[in-house]
Image (cartoon, grey):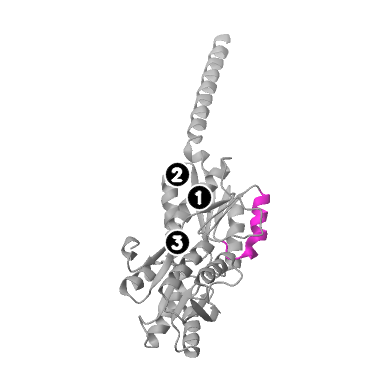
Amino acid sequence: MNRKVNLFAAVAASMTLMLAACGSDSGDNGSGDEGDAVKIGFITKFPVDFYDTMVDAAKEWDSKEDGAEVVYGQGKSGTDDEGEIAAIQSMVTQGVDAIVITPTSPNVQDDLQKAVDAGIEVILVDNDIPDWDGKTSVVATDNLAGGKLAGEWLAENLPEGSSIAVLQGVLGNPSLDDRVTGMKETLGDAAEVVAEAPTDCDQTKGLDAAQDILTANPDLDAIYAACGPPLLGALEAIKSDGKEGKLITVGFDASPDELTAIADGTQSGSVAQFPAKMGSMGLQAALDAINGEDVSANIDTGTEMVTKDNVAEFQ
């Protein structure tokens, strides 16, 4: 009887050791890179070339970074505050460690603050929310400097006594407003601004605004747009008016369609931004912040004036 008890005890002890060993192996496998990866939410405004380029760069960064997993969200337009707010709330529910976002407007600030209060780092990309101190960093073009670059080029290339119209972006958006402010600063008295119209960075609205401006100002010499889509709309209006290639036209973004127009000679120039840098550098700033590393409050991704002389370098 004792021999049977001892045998059962030995078998039980052996099984306990085997289970403990299996549990230890399972624990080791779960503590690899995938288990330790932080989760970062990446939210862009809407699906156009500029943000598509940014998202592609984010996906490339994610594919090379074992320490992070990126989840994505996107609105439907440049003014879709509700869409971005829904994406922010979804990211919080998913338990992200950081949110990288191109904010549509300051209207998304309250929900971003709730994310910060929940311990989530927030990196703003492309656009700032100037009066909000909950952000960790702003990764963006220096839009005022970009506007000044456009103004300098226009001042050098417009004939004396010229008139110019301005297609604004989203009124009240600090980054887009800076592009107009900077342009006017360096344009100085080289040309008279005879018309301004908001477009929400929408191509159709740019077309409509340009048609109205051309009708009211038949001798207009130039059009400047604070973003790429409305400038493309303006090119349609200029063509319909029989003036293709006769006005000086400058946009802001240097999107693929703008680059094609510049190469074809139907657009004069555009201020290039670097959305790919915004995507990758925004995610890197988020990862650094999560890991407790120092992150600069402002990270400039650069600008450059693109004309027919150098457009091939950007295509």
The answer to whether marks 2 and 1 mark residues whose Cβ atoms lie closer than 8 Å is yes
Residue nearer the viewer, 68 or 213: 213
Q: Count the labels in the image.
A: 3
Q: Is residue 41 left or right of residue 258?
A: right
Which of labels 3 and 1 is toward the front?
3
For the residue labelled by badge 1, is the local secondary structure a helix, a strand or a loop?
Answer: helix
x and y percent of residue 187 in the render?
50, 72
Identify which amino acid the numbered label 2 is placed on.
Answer: Glu
Q: Quadrant of the N terminus?
A: top right
Q: In which quadrant of the rendered view does residue 248 lie?
A: bottom left
Residue holding disc 1: 283
Name which residue lies at 45% across and 72% down. Answer: 155
- In this picture, residue 9 sits left or right of residue 313: right
Label 3, secondary structure: give it: loop
Mark 3 and mark 1 lie on one chain; the one further toward the N terminus is: 3
Work out whether residue 74 can be spotted: no
Q: Tell me if residue 113 is in the magenta stretch.
A: yes
Q: Nearer the viewer, mark 2 or mark 1?
A: 1
Residue 51 or residue 24, whichever sits in front: 51
Q: Which mark is residue 251?
A: none
Q: Report crowding for label 3: few under 14, some 14 to 19, many 20 or more residues within 10 A (C-alpha).
A: many
Give x and y (percent) for residue 308.
33, 69
The answer for how far apart the CA atoms under marks 3 and 2 are is 24 Å
**Callout 2: few (<14), some (14-19), or many (20+) C-alpha neighbours within 10 Å?**
some
Q: Secondary structure at mark 2?
A: loop
Vertical placement of 75 versus 59: above or below? below
- Residue 35 x %, y %: 51, 39
- Earlier-in-chain disc, 2 versus 1: 2
Q: Earlier in the sequence, mark 3 or mark 2?
A: 2
- The residue carrying mark 3 is 273
Please state the extent of the stretch shown in magenta in the rendering.
103-118
Q: Are marks 3 and 1 in contact (CB under 8 Å)?
A: no
